Image (spheres, rainbow, N blue to C red):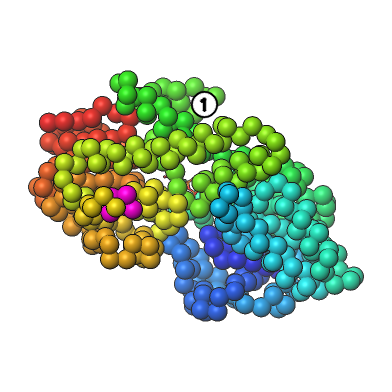
Amino acid sequence: MTITIVGHGYVGLVSACCFADFGNEVYVIGHTPSKIERLKNGDPLIYEPGLKELLEKNIKANRLHFTLEYPEAVSKSEIVFITVGTPPKENGEADLEMVFDVGKQIAKNLKKKFTVISCKSTVPVGTNKQIEKILNENRPVGVEIAVASCPEFLREGSGLHDTFFADRVVIGSYSQKAINLLLELHEPITGKKVITDLASAELIKYASNSVLAMKISFANLISFYCEKAGGDVETVLDAVGFDKRIGRVFMDPGVGYGGSCFPKDVRALTSTGNLLGINTSLLQATEDINQEARMNFLNKIIKYSGGKTIGVWGLAFKPNTDDIRFAPSIDILHALLDKGYAVKVYDQEAFGNVKKIFGDKLIYSKDPYEAATGCDAIAILTDWNEFKHIDLDKIKSIMKKPVIIDGRNIYLPEVMKKLGFTYYSTGRVPVTQ
Ligand code: UDX
């Protein structure tokens, strides 16, 4: 099958590489010449484990093509995917300008008798109907189209695995012909196939991300109780999670969620709900608690560091990515700098993005040891594996005072006690010496 993917972010590029790897002919359309050149040369532009190798393999096999031009790609394709960004506006609404603009470009360049236009960008319920209208207004006479919503559920850092081994493939469309083509394309993916209407497919994506965000905020809410009233949040949540109706996954408390999806999607669902006259206080509370988790962590640094030099381990919004969009680190670094702290930072992938925001205001370290040297306290913001296996005796010996404030609960309090650290984690009894 020949397909086109418009956009080459996490969703676009990962999908393109996976579909090409299944043996399809895949065109990827971008709009920045320098980026398209780099992609053609096998540079994925983002850090995603395994992506560079898959990109190089499929370019070499001549199945994966990058272009700035719509005509050569769209005119040959049976399916065209829209995977461009839907960033949040000031009021939380998803900004759909790019999606609609791409829809217009696709429409103008359609040549095949029948083409499926499928939106993988996360868009509010009702958007695909608007895309359909734009396509119909701009398509040449005599070509037929069908729209389909095909949301993407991949996580950054495990994007390839999540695509190849997806739990489910959701296809929303009113056209059986479109559903059949999309089923054929997704055939190698073994996950459950959910065939539904456009509105349900659009809602499935927001519902999935919002319920995951809610689980995290719920875990953080319980951690606040443990911190105020005593109790160990991990024990509480483990026991809660043994109930099969609840489960334990995605209930790790800490500094809260970030990234390009949860913060934006919870706000966008709230905004749609407000427009529809639905009570969205559950979603609003999810966002508020997430913000409180960041502030709670910041207050611990201020209260317990006992000095003005802080080492920060982990800046990416989660491990295995260089992405810092809406990361807790951004709020926390800004607040520490405003309060006059000297901040030594370390992250194995995110420096490029962090430097674009903070420039030389931070002290960049080549490894976690350098970031810890001479510090009054270390604050852990991302649960990179590297920090879990670190030589803590060495860390203790190079710090001014052995104080660790852990926003991801990566160490056991009893181990930290034995090692001689003062250790403040999330929702667990503090370790003092
Ligand atoms: C998320 C969804 O998981 C994915 O299905 C969707 O397609 C896109 O949005 P992603 O943003 O890549 O993926 O990361 P995810 O692994 O879900 O983590 C999001 C944030 O939640 C991270 O900041 C992470 O640290 C945080 N998190 C996750 C917690 O704080 N606690 C948890 O228990 C799990």
Chain part drawn in magenta: 333-337
Q: Position of residue 80 (x, y in %)?
A: 71, 64
**Of 296 and 28, which appears nearest the observer?**
296
Which residue occupies the extreme right position in the image?
142
**Crowding near pointer 1: few (<14 within 10 Å), some, many (20+)?**
few
Residue 79 x, y percent position in the rendering: 73, 63
Would you say the magenta stretch is mainly helix, strand or loop? helix
Q: Please report the residue visible at 65 percent of the width from the left and 39 percent of the height from the top.
A: 274
Q: Name the residue under label 1.
A: 246
Q: In this view, does 390 lie to the left or right of 157?
A: left
Residue 211 visible in this rendered orientation of the protein: no
User: In this view of the protein, which residue sits in the foreground, 5 or 364?
Assistant: 364
Residue at image position (19%, 45%) is: 377
| Residue 317 image offset from top left, x and y in percent | 41, 50
Residue 86 falls left or right of residue 294:
right
Q: What element carries label 1?
A: loop
Q: How many labels does the image show?
A: 1
Q: Residue shown at 39%/37% (left/top)?
A: 293
Is residue 183 shown left or right of residue 383? right
Q: Does residue 240 show up magenta in the picture?
A: no
Q: In the rendering, at what x and y percent does residue 138 appear?
A: 81, 69
Q: Could you tell whether 38 is left or right of 26 in the image?
A: left
**Mark 1 residue type:** Ile
Q: Where the N terminus falls, by quadrant?
A: bottom right
